[in-house]
Amino acid sequence: MSPPGKACFYCERDRYRDIDHIRPIRFFPETCFSWQNFVYACTRCNQDAKRDQVWIINESGELLKYDRSTPLGTALPRGLHALIDIRHEDPLEFLALELETGLFVAIGQDAVTRLRGCFTRDLFGLNSDDLSKIRRQMRETFILYLTRYSDATRAGDPDAAERALDEIKELPHPTVLDEIRRQAPSDSRTAPLLDGLPAWPNPLR
């Protein structure tokens, strides 16, 4: 169920493969064997950044942190989890990718939604220099393969179109393609390339 290349669902890089419990079993032991609580991740995002930590936005809007220093059995307060639950929530409802810069910006109708977007982005270092550079490069790569797909479709060559489509599905950093799709209506360069491009299912669902 991982992104292309068995990459991390948080940073989309293929490194030091691991499995993350979205809700840490230290605080949510009942989710230990729940499929809906598993996500493919790299060890840096899972063990270095996230770890056995929970962040709650309480009813006063405060961000509260609970970690291994918190006594077992501590009751967590009512409120929202600051970390986006990527098995049940679409990160692109919290974050938008600036394709020209490769940087994520928080979006949303309310302050809590934007806070959760900023928190998740910053926790995993999603706007690091290397990741933003990779996303800028991947934008051009996706456009190249989308052009191949579009040209083959217009030329009536279904085999070439299918090959291009298979290659697109295997490209890393699929969030870049998701954002190209979202911004296509206002981008005359990419909009024509998406004509007839099928939507494939989210592997997390």
Image: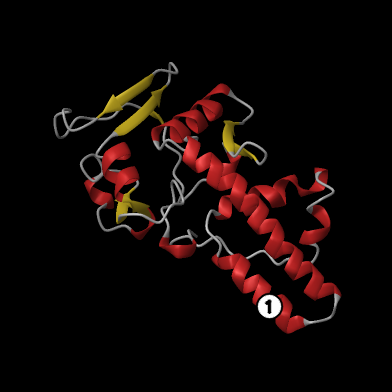
Task: State how many labels appear.
Answer: 1
Going by the image, does 139 lie left or right of 37? right
44 vs 65, nearest the viewer = 44
| Residue 91 seen | no
Q: Residue at x 35, y 46 (%)?
A: 22
**Mark 1 highlights which residue?**
162
Q: Position of residue 122 (x, y in %)?
A: 44, 31
| Residue 21 seen | yes
Q: Position of residue 162 (x, y in %)?
A: 68, 78
Q: Tag 1: residue type?
A: Glu
Q: 10 Å neighbourhood of mark 1: few (<14), some, or many (≥20)?
A: some
Residue 33 position by quadrant: bottom left
Disc 1 secondary structure class:
helix
Residue 127, above or below 21? above
Q: Residue at x 35, y 60 (%)?
A: 35
Q: Position of residue 194 (x, y in %)?
A: 77, 60
Going by the image, does 175 lie left or right of 158? left
91 vs 73, nearest the viewer = 91
Residue 29, above or below 5? above
Going by the image, does 166 lie left or right of 19? right
Instruction: Describe the colour scheme in one phrase.
Output: secondary structure
Q: Position of residue 105 (x, y in %)?
A: 59, 31
Residue 174, above or below 147? above
Quadrant for the N terminus, please: bottom left
Q: Residue at x 34, y 30 (%)?
A: 55
Q: Residue at x 43, y 61 (%)?
A: 2
